Amino acid sequence: MPKATAETWIAAWARAAIQVSAVAFGTWFLFYRLRLPLPFRDLAKLLLAAVLCGAAARACLLLMPGAVALLVAIPAGAAVYIVSIRFLRALPAGDIDRLRAMIRPLPAPFRTVAELGLRAIAAAETVPPSPVGAPSASPLQSVSPRQPQPLATALGIQGGRNAD
């Protein structure tokens, strides 16, 4: 493996600084200028799950030699991420419902795999999905018209897209 030079370290830190600055500005703009509530607790849980994922993948790379480590690190990191999201309850029920609405138009084999993935990360109190072959609403429609979503609530919108 080639050694990292000073230029590569500077470039890596510069890129990281740009990314952090972009996220910080975006957060400031949404929170202070648009007055949108941001789910900081849920975002922190997702960040913790991502850190645990990275730590698991890094541990595999450090403990195993060669390219085989990469073949183990990727699934290990993914598994730790899924378990962390479920254990931390990092995705609110509304987000799980929106993800379910987004996967409904997928072809049956992909939809089945995606639904199994959602079941793996969903907390037990979420509403069970409709059967895979059941007709579904358009993903552009609101998943639950009687439950306002956080962004809709912040903008003063009640009900779903097709609410009367």
Image (cartoon, helix red, strand yellow):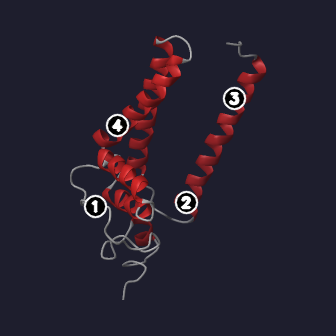
Above or below, comparing residue 64 to residue 137 in the picture: above
Mark number, residue 129 = 1
Mark number, residue 84 = 4
* SS for callout 4: helix
**Where is mark 2, residue-wise?**
30
| Quadrant of image for the C terminus | bottom left
Q: Position of residue 48 (x, y in %)?
A: 41, 36
Q: Residues under labels 4 and 2: Cα distance?
A: 27 Å
Q: Position of residue 157 (x, y in %)?
A: 42, 78
Above or below, comparing residue 97 to residue 90 in the picture: below
Q: Verify CB contact (< 8 Å) between mark 1 and mark 2.
A: no
Dot 2 alpha-carbon crowd within 10 angstroms: few under 14, some 14 to 19, many 20 or more: few
- Of pointers 2 and 3, the one earlier in the residue sequence: 3
Single out the mark in the foreground, 1 or 3.
1
Q: Residues under labels 2 and 3: Cα distance?
A: 27 Å
Mark number, residue 72 = none
- Of pointers 1 and 2, the one earlier in the residue sequence: 2
- Of pointers 3 and 4, the one earlier in the residue sequence: 3
- Of pointers 4 and 1, the one earlier in the residue sequence: 4
Give the residue at x 52% y 22%: 70
Q: Residues under labels 1 and 3: Cα distance?
A: 43 Å
* SS for callout 3: helix
- Of pointers 1 and 3, the one earlier in the residue sequence: 3
Mark number, residue 12 = 3
- Of pointers 4 and 2, the one earlier in the residue sequence: 2
Q: Which amino acid type is marked by label 3?
A: Ala
Which of the 4 image quadrants contains residue 134?
bottom left
Residue found at the very far bottom of the displayed protein:
164
Dot 3 alpha-carbon crowd within 10 angstroms: few under 14, some 14 to 19, many 20 or more: few
Q: Residues under labels 1 and 2: Cα distance?
A: 32 Å
